[in-house]
Image: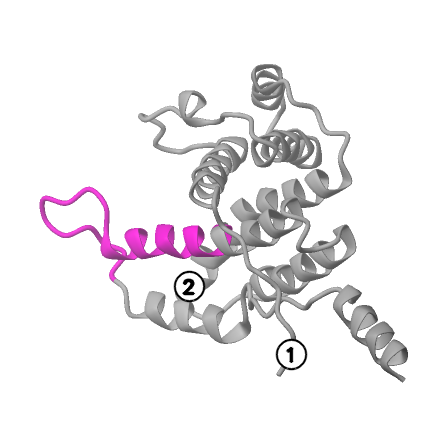
Amino acid sequence: MCTDMAKKAKAKQAEPMKLFYIFYNQERWDNWLTTLEGADFEPAEGEEVSEGEQMLYSFTEDITLSVLKIIRLYQNDRLTKEEATAKLDDVELIVMTGLPAGELEDIIGSLQLSLLVLFTACRKYLEGGFDKDIKTLVKKGRALDEEELEEALEVAANIGAAVIDGATCCAKYIKDDMENPGLFDEWLIEIETMSNAMKSLAKFDEVPGETS
């Protein structure tokens, strides 16, 4: 009897513990949209950046950080590749599906376009086998025409995967004087946000626990 109980207890301890962390949900997305709806996107007198633009950048940071927490837990062996991919799919469905009506439509559409590289880079990292030669990749991406979006995204995703893996990018490749950056440059800006997020998550982890 005691032996059976011991075996059951041991088996229970061996079961993988569950993570309770909620990475992103619809309510969080909707709250951000509501905040942006009330923001002024015209810079105040003497200011270069508007209130709305500042909020939009914080919005982007929030999404990027949430997504990369999934990857960080995968790196810490808290999530399997399949679990990380499923959680990534869940967040992508919220962020990349549909557009709000009204004035925010173009703004969120542009945001979704820039975040393409975040989700694509995460998947490429999880799959492995990505290129890590940042300098060559940036040169290749800049040489592509604006119409070659799939090729450009593939190049940018390789850069993003390399950054998730620990490579440094992309501050020195982003020009401060760019008034109308192309899509590849927008993706480099997002990858720089990813780079900063990964640094901030260096000690991030969640200890699994049993359900109550």
Q: Residue at x 89, y 79 (%)?
A: 4
How many marks on residues? Answer: 2
Q: Residue at x 47, y 27 (%)?
A: 170
Which residue is the extreme one toward the front? 2
Vertical order, 23 against 4 (above or below): above
Q: Position of residue 50 (x, y in %)?
A: 23, 51
Disc 1 marks a residue whose amino acid type is Thr
Q: Nearer the viewer, residue 101 or 79?
A: 79
Instruction: Indicate left or right for 82 with 170 as reference.
Output: right
Q: Residue at x 29, y 70 (%)?
A: 38
- Front of the two marks 1 and 2: 1
Q: Position of residue 193 (x, y in %)?
A: 44, 40
Instruction: Indicate left or right for 50 with 28 as reference.
Output: left
Magenta range is 40-64
Q: Which residue is mark 2?
A: 104
Disc 2 marks a residue whose amino acid type is Leu
Residue 189 at least partly seen:
yes
Q: Position of residue 156 (x, y in %)?
A: 61, 32
Q: Which residue is mark 1?
A: 211
Vertical order, 35 against 145 (above or below): below
Give the mark nearest the N terminus, 1 or 2. Answer: 2
